[in-house]
Every structure is written in C-alpha cells, then in structure tokens.
Amino acid sequence: MPHILILGATGTIGNALAQSLVRSGNHTVYGLARSPAKANSLALQEIIPVLGSVQEPQGFLTLLDEHPEVSVVVDAAAVYGDSATLLNLIIDAAKKRLAKYKQVGVPAGPKLGYVYVSGMWLHGSSHNVVSDQDPFVGTIATKTPPVNMVGWRPEVEQLVLAPETRASLDTAIVRAACTYGGSSAIWTGPFSAVLKAVRTESRPEKVQIGLDPHGTAALAHVDDVASGIRLLIEKIPQFAGTGIYPVFDLMSQIESIKAIMEGVARALGYKGTVELVGPPEGDVVGDALGASVIGDSGRAKTLLGWVPTKKGFLHGIDVYAQAWLAGFEKK
C-alpha cells in the first residue's frame, strides 16, 4: 500500500485530497499539522498526523528518513515565500534516500515522488485560451503575467521542473482552477459582503462587490480537484522518464463571475441588485477571483483518466452557498 505525505493536510485542497486517498482504500496517508489540535482533527479522519511546519521540519524529515515506504510528498500548503525552502528540504531528503540505497548496495531503489499543487491563475487574466503544455507560463516570455496573488509561484514551479531537482525526485505539478464546495473559503470576501447586506436592518437596495463584472472563472469543485491529484499520485512512477510534460490544469467549468454572485445573493436571500465594480487597488484576492481564465483539462482527462463529477457552481449554487454559510458561521 503506497504511503503519502501531505503538506497542507488541514487546508481546503490538502484535506480533500487526504480524504480522497483514505476513502480509496489504497493509501496510507500522513498529514502535516502545526498544532496538537489540528493533529487530532487529522487523526479523527484516519490520517496519521505529523507535527511540524516549514519552520520546524524535523518531524516530516524524520518520517521520510525512517520510512522509505513513503513514496510521494504532496505540497498543498501554499506557504508563499517558504515554498522554495520547503521544496529544498524535500530535495535534500530525496538525495539522502538515494545515497542510502547506494550505501547498502540497493542497485535501483525508487525515487521519492513530489507533487506541487499550484493554480491556474498563473496563466494570468485574459479571454485567450490557455494550455498546460505551454512551458512559458509565468516567465518573461508569457503573453499574460500571473495574477498578483500568485506572482511568487512561477519561481517555485521552475524549481520543481528543473533537471537538478528531477535528478533526485519524480516531480509533477497540478494547477487547480478556483475551487468551490465545502467552506468555499476563498470566496468569503464577496459572499460575506452579500450576507452583510442581507442582515443589515435597512436592507440596502444595492450591494457593490469588488470583482471584475466581465470575469469568467475557471472552476472546479474541491472534491474533483482532489480526485485529479490522487490520480496523478498514482501515475507518477509511470510518467518518470517518459518525456511527458508533468504539468496538469484541473478545471471542469468556466462560469460568469457576475452570474455566480447573483446566484449566491438569491441563495442567501438578498432581494436587491448585485453590482460588480472591480477590485479596489491592492485587493489581490478580489483581483484573482475576478480573473478570466479560459482553459481545458484535456490532458488530465486523457493521461490521468480524470473525470470530474460535479456539474458546476451555478448548477448547485443553493447548496454551495449554504455550505459556505455553515462554514463561515462556524468560525
């Protein structure tokens, strides 16, 4: 049974992935947790907790050293400036594992696998069709720069794909579309603005939202993203050394930002007008949520066998709005 370590196992995508792996019955799953409380929440989900963080990495480094059956590390942590540091720690652990093979006379032990969870906002915002086979995404040669919120990710992606890294690790990248479902935490800013209008005694006739009124979002339900990453984890040994470009966009719908906000407003009981006015200067989250990304996941479907099952944000907007509300009020 493969053993998988997930960094960011308590986050939106990381936790959905951990649950997907556990439910498959084919994986033993370890999850990095920053605190005993978060460790306990992972244990309750049948995920083996490993206490630690980027700043205190000894726990997961010891796991990789003492348990060669851990075959893949997934970085779903989105730790911004620390992502490269985290990857370098994993590279060192992989080199140590390969050196141990040589030391004890193992002729050809398996490399450690590494999946980096990135995002489709690296393609930037435009109405041009984008591709996960474009090697220039995020570089100075790209037609559209990444949205500001993920401007740090291209450097990490280049390190993941570098020949020096792949000499020690079997690497791959998943670029997830903007997720919905469950707590839909990334949507809290605009959704909470609508909720505030609903709960204001005067019930304003108009609520203004700082999103691009012309935005068309690439979307995927968080559970569909998790299933795509699980399939990639299972394919990594087959892809190693084949020449397949190991970058996969995961998206299942393209929907109007304006239609999403109007649907959420109806679901939350707002009777007035929702006006999208564009993000204020410096609002990197609003800038990202309103970005237009037109892509497809044909390679993920043909090479990984990915079959997203959710019909779309708008299709289940009442359910997704109430799920967001439940998560929002639980905090």
Image (cartoon, rainbow, N blue to C red):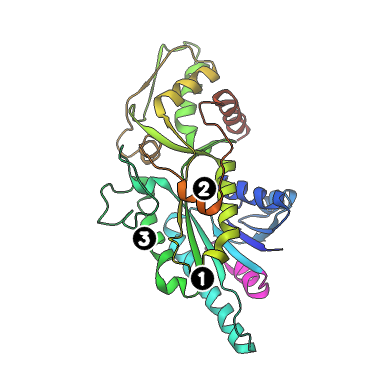
Q: Let me know if residue 56 appears in the view.
A: no
- Magenta residues, as a range? 54-69
- 143 left or right, relative to 292: left
Residue 51 position, x and y percent, is 64, 61
Amino acid at dot 3: Glu
Q: Against 198, is 4 above or below?
A: below
Amino acid at dot 2: Lys
Mark 2 surroundings: few (<14), some (14-19) or many (≥20) residues within 10 A: some
The answer to whether mark 3 and mark 1 are in CB contact below 8 A is no
Q: Against 236, is 91 above or below?
A: below
Mark 3: secondary structure: helix
Q: What mark, if any, has residue 276 been given in the picture?
A: none
Residue 286 position, x and y percent, is 38, 35
In which quadrant is the C terminus drawn?
top right
Q: Return the residue at label 2.
A: 301
- 321 left or right, relative to 205: right
Residue placed most toward the observer, 281 or 323: 323
Distance from the alpha carbon under mark 3 to that under mark 1: 17 Å
In which quadrant is the N terminus drawn?
bottom right
Residue 227 position, x and y percent, is 59, 47
Q: Return the residue at label 3.
A: 155
In front of the other: label 1 or label 2?
Answer: 2
Q: Residue at the spot x=52%, y=60% of the render?
A: 115
In front of the other: label 3 or label 2?
Answer: 2
Q: Residue at the spot x=41%, y=36% of the render?
A: 289
Mark 3 surroundings: few (<14), some (14-19) or many (≥20) residues within 10 A: few
Q: What mark, if any, has residue 169 been given in the picture?
A: 1
Distance from the alpha carbon under mark 3 to that under mark 2: 27 Å
Mark 1 and mark 2 lie on one chain; the one further toward the N terminus is 1
